[in-house]
Image: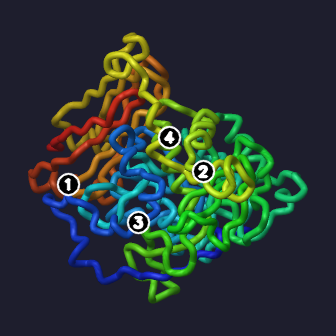
Amino acid sequence: MRLGYLRWMRKLVILAALAGTLGTSATALAAPDPLRPQQYGLDIVESDAAHARATGAGAIVAVVDTGVRPTHQDLAGRLLPTKNLVAGDGPEDEDGHGTHVLGIAVANDGNGVGVSSVAPGATALPVRVLGDDGSGFTRDVAKGIDFAVEQGAHVINLSLGDTVPVGAVTGSQGEVEEAILRALARNVVVVASSGNNGAPICEQGLANDPRLLCVGAVGPDRKRSVFSSFVGPEGITAPGGNALGDDILSTFSKNERDAQSDSEYTELAGTSQAAPHVAGVAALLVQLGLRGQDVVRRLRETASDAGLPGPDSEFGAGIVNARAAVASVSPPPGPGGAPGGSTPTRVSLAGTQRFRNVLKRGIRVKCTASSAGHCTATATRADRGFAFGAKRVAAGRTVTVLARPDAAARRAIKRASRRGRKIRVTVQVAVPGLATKTRRVTLRR
């Protein structure tokens, strides 16, 4: 069975004339993001106010979609390698939808480039299940969900589906619904768009399962977008544009079939854009130690009421609110984030590492965690991705993470080795129970 992403999106603003504004440099690293004032969605969910307590560090958000443009300037250091499940198409996002959705959740913040996001410290796992034409098969979506779970995703974003599935009405389950149930059983937060048909129900096959978080869209006036399907009393809403010119600005990928889409950023509208706002807030709560249904409950409890007083079928629990969600949630207590002061959380890595070892194994990082989760190590050079590694860690245990260089980084290392030069990189390490640590590492022969 074929399906695609939710198709109300319209490319209303193509921001191609920003080359002079968006160039990166060392002095831009702490500069404001120039397009942030246009992101009213972040204002509605109050994500900036939440970042003093959490940025999503250590959380993995899987975006099961059309993939991602991995070289995008505003996604450097945020991405795990893309898993491509689309036969006959290359690994990169030629459509743009996945890149747009992903940027809403995890684009870099404060780097002086482009836009910001809800969870700029989180790591994204792009899973490509839709092809260059924006459509794909349910079997691939199911495989993508299973892959995300096996890779340790804490949150899965599903901005998918362009017709009302039979299961949304009958309650029957297909292979995608079965994969979602497997993810829920593994304590993963699953966030899914409600649909763009203006239907009085959530257009997801598991809409009646309260563990699935169905997300509808609101415009800048906080009213339900005319295209947005309802979410039911267990659902939630988030900014998704109104298709009248006030849409959601995010990262984008050039679409070879559309000459107007040659842009780093654009505005789109749909419940596809609402869902990653919620997935990003879920990532903030993951950093603070919540998992699975504890995250879902917290999102509902702290949503800003909308529509009729209390939960209703149109707005669900209300509009997701990042500031309120993180306000009274604390990281694991104790020194270094250790519960009761038992096992301190630590990060260690050598300040100088050899080219040959990095090429063979990766940049070596040791993590000791006070609580279970993932240790992630992200290396950047000149504000671009260089190497990445992640490994699951049990509470009180120590693991070694190897941040493996990507293809461009490997070429740079080989050139530097031949010329007798050094390479300096910035390594950010996220460990459960500890704020993200940043270290400078020198690579040499």
Q: Which of the two residues, 155 or 314, is positioned nearer the viewer here?
A: 314
The residue located at (59%, 49%) in the rendering is 156
Image quadrant occupied by the N terminus: bottom right
Q: Which residue is mark 2?
A: 305
Q: Secondary structure at mark 3?
A: loop
Amino acid on which the number 3 mark rests in the picture = Gln
Q: Earlier in the sequence, mark 1 or mark 4?
A: 1
Q: Residue 305 in the image: x percent, y percent?
A: 60, 50
Q: Which residue is mark 1?
A: 30
The residue located at (77%, 52%) in the rendering is 207
Q: Secondary structure at mark 1?
A: loop
Q: Which mark is residue 39?
A: 3
Between the residue at mark 1 and the residue at mark 4, the CA separation in whole angstroms equals 26 Å
The furthest residue to the front: 309
Residue 135: quadrant of the picture = bottom right
Q: Which of the two residues, 112 or 405, is positioned nearer the viewer here?
A: 112
Q: Which residue is mark 4?
A: 325
Between the residue at mark 2 and the residue at mark 4, the CA separation in whole angstroms equals 13 Å
Amino acid on which the number 4 mark rests in the picture = Ala
